[in-house]
Image (cartoon, rainbow, N blue to C red):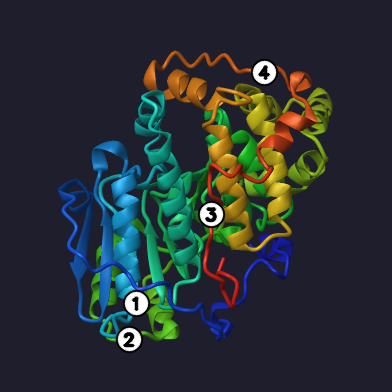
Amino acid sequence: MQRFKALLPQQTRSSLRTLCSHRRAFSAQPNYAKHHDDDSQEQILVEGRAKSRAAILNRPSSLNSLNASMVARLKRLYDSWEENSDIGFVLMKGSGRAFCSGADVVRLYHSLNEGNTDEAEQFFKTLYSFVYLQGTYLKPHVAILDGITMGCGSGISLPGMFRVVTDKTVFSHPEAQIGFHPDAGASYVLSRLPGYLGEYLALTGDKLNGVEMIACRLATHYSLNARLSLLEERLGKLITDEPSVVESSLAQYGDLVYPDRSSVLHRIDTIDRCFSHETVEEIIEALEKEAAESNDEWYSTTLRRIREASPLSLKVTLQSIREGRFETLDKCLVREYRMSLRGISKHVSSDFFEGVRARMVDRDFAPKWDPPRLKDISEDMVEYYFSPLSEVQSELVLPTALREPYM
């Protein structure tokens, strides 16, 4: 475990015992008007507790994937809870076997094919605004990541103060494999992992379990799934807004764990050698060279995962993670918003539509990427994703924060 602690850059996170005392200014007054969205009320449940509130993602049949109405309801709830002095802290969890499998990309795919681009833009704008709210929340926040946590599922949880993982947690960012890019703050989070682990996870879509998330500081606490009911019961009785009290309660039901010998974290030196290169082509070349000198199947598996992804998404994703290393959360989100709108525009490529079709709609798992090869992708095609939006599309505007997120 000490090996992984030593790998962490100093700027990755401050100790929870020395949280910065600066606070983000309150957001604009939340809309307290009654909303008549029965679906979102069923899909985001609320539990009232002594001095806290819990938001429960409740689409278990869809692995709690997020749609526009769910994100909008989360944003409204969190805005109102932040300004309610009777609420000391907030908790989020999922129902069923997932915390959140990310955005409902199938619904987004069909909506875009019907020409509803405005709906997609609003979805991304609301989602990224909520990620920023989560990352700069004025009150302690506990996310219980029990089960599948993919894509923007990490975006709505990891920037917060406390992240509890379990023996059921499965974390991944497989966006490049469906012709998209890791978004919702992923370029901020992944770029702050030890060494070049973030590049590895983003380009391969490989998974981490809860123990590995603890080891590389994606999570703050680990608890066995069987103990979660005790942990939640303890939290539900707390009457506090003090982070240290919440932390001590989480620690009371925590477990000390270490990655097993098969963990990819034990390959951090190899990952650094291969994934520190400047381009995707050089990363692949480095992996091929090491594979030729070794009988280790890990290399061939890693190469296969990369080659299954959209070549354009690989290049866009790598640049996004590299830029994220030097940007604050708000800057990452503003840039990712541009990238997402470019990715669904079909102006340069239709890889998002082809990836979702092949892997999630028709399920033939044989996407026809365009362009099909890395060598066919020009610098201009990649830079298009990072360029400012046109006057027709408004940029994402976030309130100014006085401190960095806890992540």
Q: Nearer the viewer, mark 1 or mark 4?
A: 4
Residue 238 drawn above or below residue 108: below
> What is the secondary structure assignment of the residue under circle 4?
loop
The reply to whether callout 1 and callout 4 are in contact (CB within 8 Å) is no
The Cα atoms of the two marked residues, 1 and 4, are separated by 48 Å
User: Which mark sits nearer the N-terminus, 2 or 1?
Assistant: 1
Residue 396 is tagged as 3
* Label 1 Cα crowd, 10 Å radius (few <14 / some 14-19 / many 20+): many
Q: Which mark is residue 89?
A: 1
Badge 2 is on which residue? 240
The image quadrant that residue 249 belongs to is bottom left
Asked where in the image residue 203 lies, by quadrant, the reply is top right
Q: Secondary structure at mark 3?
A: loop
How far apart are the two marked residues, 2 and 3, measured between alpha carbons? 34 Å
Query: Which amino acid type corresponds to the residue marked 4 in the rendered image?
Result: Pro
Left or right, residue 295 beside residue 60: right
Q: Secondary structure at mark 1?
A: strand
Q: Residue at x 62, y 75 (%)?
A: 14
Q: CA distance from mark 2 to mark 1?
A: 7 Å
Foreground of the two, 190 or 322 = 322
